[in-house]
Amino acid sequence: MSAGSLYAIKNAFAIINMTYRCHVIFGMIQAESENMKIDRLIGILSVLLQEEKTTAPELAERFEVSRRTINRDIEDLCKAGIPIQTSQGIGGGISIMDGYRMDRTILTSKDMQMILAGLRSLDSVSGSMYYGQLMEKIQAGSSEFISGRDSILIDLSSWYRETLIPKIETIQNAIGERHLIRFHYYAPSGESERTVEPYYLVFRWSSWYLWGRCTSGGRGHKADHSGTEKHRNRDDFRLFKLNRMDCVQETEEAFEHKDAAMPDLSNEKIFPGKIRVKAIFEPDQKWRLVEEFGPKCFTEKDDGRLLFTADYTDMENLITWLMTFGDKAEVLEPLEARNAIAQIVHRMMIKYSKDQ
């Protein structure tokens, strides 16, 4: 293995494992500012992985601290499991043991390409330079290691980029600081003001969501048919679609972080099939059925039309979806959906005939 490849592997490994190591070190820090200490330890580890050897005076000058502080930092890195060795006299200094470099897990060029693809995807919805700078760190000195052209390009941004990015930044910061967030939420059941403990940002089904726990103080409201407001307590975990959130604010109120399980985002859990649908579609709508439900969701009739069958989760969404096909679709089952669409079409005819 060439020296350049070993250097690139060493640098990449440092970036991937640095967060984990620093979480371990974090528990050891007591005497000074935690964030400043963490940043300095990351910096020292990065220097040691990029340079064969350095000295305490050089590190002290670079990070603008005393040699005593650097010595304490080296001790903390050793306690975290980083095999650092020091030597005295001429030509001495601080370095990472050679055996550690050779025994570590080796990342391949393909591994690095996948890491960079993931970082680029996050950079597409970032309002800061963080992910771009992180990619530069990984790529620094790794030109010999990263070969070939990019094979995967992922863009997570949306038409709502200008409003989406500030929401993501606010929520990310609130998750890191463990602060409650407040926002106005628009849902099919009505509008509400929510106070939520944020846990995860989720990208699924081509949209961004927040997985969080509504606090007992977060009350929503919904207008009933008489116009009065119905108040409802919410004290459980749920998904909130970012595009339905408005006036997102991080509060100064901290919450006790719970061991929240990752949300079950399977289609069966989020969209349980409760409604059996049968409909006839015109042949020129095949592309859309394949795109949305796959090529096995229909059978072709003798006249070329498509008999579609599937399970749907919500009657209101089903009717809305069928209406987007216009006269290219005819629902057969359930009868409730067929009657609802007939009533909608009738009301539309009355509304549009008024202008004639």
Image: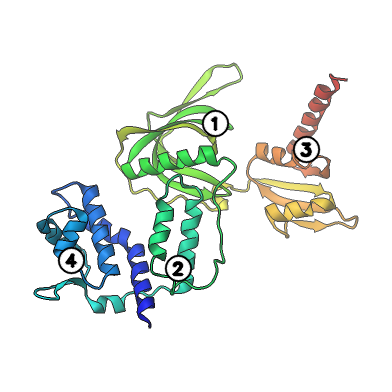
Secondary structure beneath disc 2? helix
Question: Marks 3 and 1, how far apart in space?
Answer: 28 Å
Disc 3 + disc 2, Cβ < 8 Å: no
Q: Which residue is mark 2?
A: 112
Give the quarter of the image for residue 138.
bottom left
The percent coordinates of residue 114 (x first, y second) are 49, 65
Foreground disc of the pair 4, 2: 2
The label shown at residue 125 is none
Compared to 187, does 87 lie above or below?
Answer: below
The percent coordinates of residue 27 (x first, y second) are 20, 54
Residue at the image point whose x is 81% and y is 48% from the top: 280
Residue that extends furthest to the right in the rendered view of this protein:
303
Secondary structure beneath disc 1? strand
Residue at the image point whose x is 70% and y is 47% from the top: 276
Residue type (three-letter) at the residue carrying disc 3? Arg
Q: Which residue is mark 1?
A: 186
Residue type (three-letter) at the residue carrying disc 4? Cys
The percent coordinates of residue 178 (x first, y second) are 32, 41
Residue at the image point whose x is 31% and y is 61% from the top: 18
The label shown at residue 338 is 3
Q: Between residue 111 and residue 227, name the one nearer to us.
A: 111
Residue that extends furthest to the bottom in the rendered view of this protein:
1
Near mark 4 (Cα within 10 A), the count class, few <14, some 14-19 or many ≥20, is: some
Residue type (three-letter) at the residue carrying disc 1? Tyr
Q: Which residue is mark 4?
A: 78
Q: Earlier in the sequence, mark 3 or mark 1?
A: 1
Secondary structure beneath disc 3? helix
Residue type (three-letter) at the residue carrying disc 2? Met
Near mark 1 (Cα within 10 A), the count class, few <14, some 14-19 or many ≥20, is: some
Give the quarter of the image for residue 250.
top left
Question: Marks 3 and 2, how far apart in space?
Answer: 53 Å
Q: Earlier in the sequence, mark 4 or mark 1?
A: 4
